[in-house]
Image (cartoon, rainbow, N blue to C red):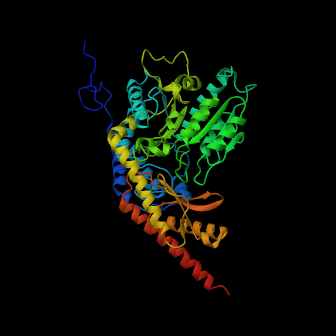
Amino acid sequence: MSASPRIDGRVGYCGPPARGTQMRGEDRATLQAAAHAAIAYRQGVAEAAQTPVADYAQVLAAFAGPTPTTGVDGAVIIDDLVRHATPGIRAMTGPRFFGWVIGGSHPTGVAADWLTAAWGQNAGNVLASPASCAVEAVAAEWLLDLLGLPPTASVGFVTGATVANFVCLAAARSEVLRQVGWDVEADGLFGAPPVQVLIGADAHATVFSGLKYLGLGAQRVTTVATDDAGRMLATDFERALKAARGPVIAIAQAGQINTGASDPFAQIAPLAKAHGAWLHVDGAFGLWAQACPTRAALTAGVELADSWATDGHKWLQTPYDCGYAIVRHPEAHRRAMAISASYLPPPEGAERDPTAYVPELSRRARGFATWAMIRQLGREGIAEMVERCCRLAAQMAADIAAEPGAELICPVELNQFMIRFGGERGGEAGDAATLATVQRVQADAVAFLGAAQWRGRWVMRCSVSSLSTTPRAARETTAAVIGAWRAVQAAQANQASLQP
């Protein structure tokens, strides 16, 4: 009898393949074609145009056609995919992408994700995939340590902060209703005691999506007033708590999407606890300030909350999609999410069942890329990256705001800032000048930045969140923005001179 295969030290090697399982040459060529194309893309992305050279309609036309009747060789398919898709790919992994809070999909994370796809693991349970479950358990411990959160908290690996918020709020709904004697998992919301939700006036849209999914209502909330940077006012939060009756969920945030500001957790967390309210924190990117000693004061007290949502595909630089739902109370987390069936083997002893913490049964093994990126950067590298992004954001904001007619809307605290152009001309004129400048920046394609509304007026919004962004890339971007603003002013002056 032959011995069972054992790992011999080579990554992914467990002995020779069984007879008949060797990869076909066509399949090997397909994988190699994809790898070569990916490497070529990443080698050139730093100098690539930041705007796709083909629009949606052009890409749609390139891919459209009747449903295939016969199959095609894989290498041909990959070649067609690269040729037709690349013109419509935005350079999100490049050093001058600032449109949204998007990380750079670091090559190490990408490589780990390639292996994840090649291994084809369904990370549903321990028996199905021991490796993915074990690596996820280790990555969860590392995440809690890096973010300064309770080591006994549970972690669900989900698609991103949108689903992470949903999962955490599901645990919150379960627990606050359990405390008043209602089993929402068994009996639903029909006849349940009403749950009151307190939320800051400048909360992110994805939190409202979670409330909608859970039947709590996106509009059935009590709004807490915020300051000029979008932080909840502790005095108004306390007033809302005192007026609340029955089960209460309070939703705070670490990193307001336009300003980067965080709520005053050290003040509001004790208030929530004294009232018996569940405090959830939407920390999609701002929670990573906890991993940076020079910025951790911005999120002081966040560890006192009951749950936290954050992303890996932002500041941890993992590939999409990767987010984390973190809950102080693992039993509430499992109660809200666990899936059971006779054909699904339960974990044994200290084994961690990933399915108990996420809404999906079949899902990608996201722990591999998370583990890889934490090893790639380490505690010191993550802290340095966060600090560097924050410094670059502050410098970029100062350089642009020094240009006449450009105004920095809020002081830069983290990695976000907003600029308004031509605001001295009045509301609508400033809106038009700002939108024209953003459009010009995007058309010039040196860098990518976007527009947003803040307090009813349009601003140019900048997010510095990629490890690939260098001081040089930052300077090139500020020069492009200033040049676009000057071009807009010149065009407007020329147009005014032509008026009778």
Residue 158 visible within the image: no
Which one is in front, 75 or 245?
245
Percent position of residue 410, x then y: 54, 58
Q: Percent x, y for residue 169? A: 60, 33
Residue drawn at x 50%, y 32% is: 326
- Above/below status of 255 relative to 371: below
Classify residue 83 by image quadrant: bottom left
**Furthest-top residue in view?**
1
Q: Could you tell me which quadrant the C terminus lies in?
A: bottom right
Percent x, y of residue 364: 46, 34
Task: Name the residue nearer the viewer: 87 or 95.
Answer: 95
Front-most of 137 and 116? 137
Left or right of 114? Residue 228 is right
Picture residue at 55% right of the left edge, 18% below the top: 341
Q: Is residue 225 above or below residue 446?
A: above
260 or 113: nearer the viewer: 260
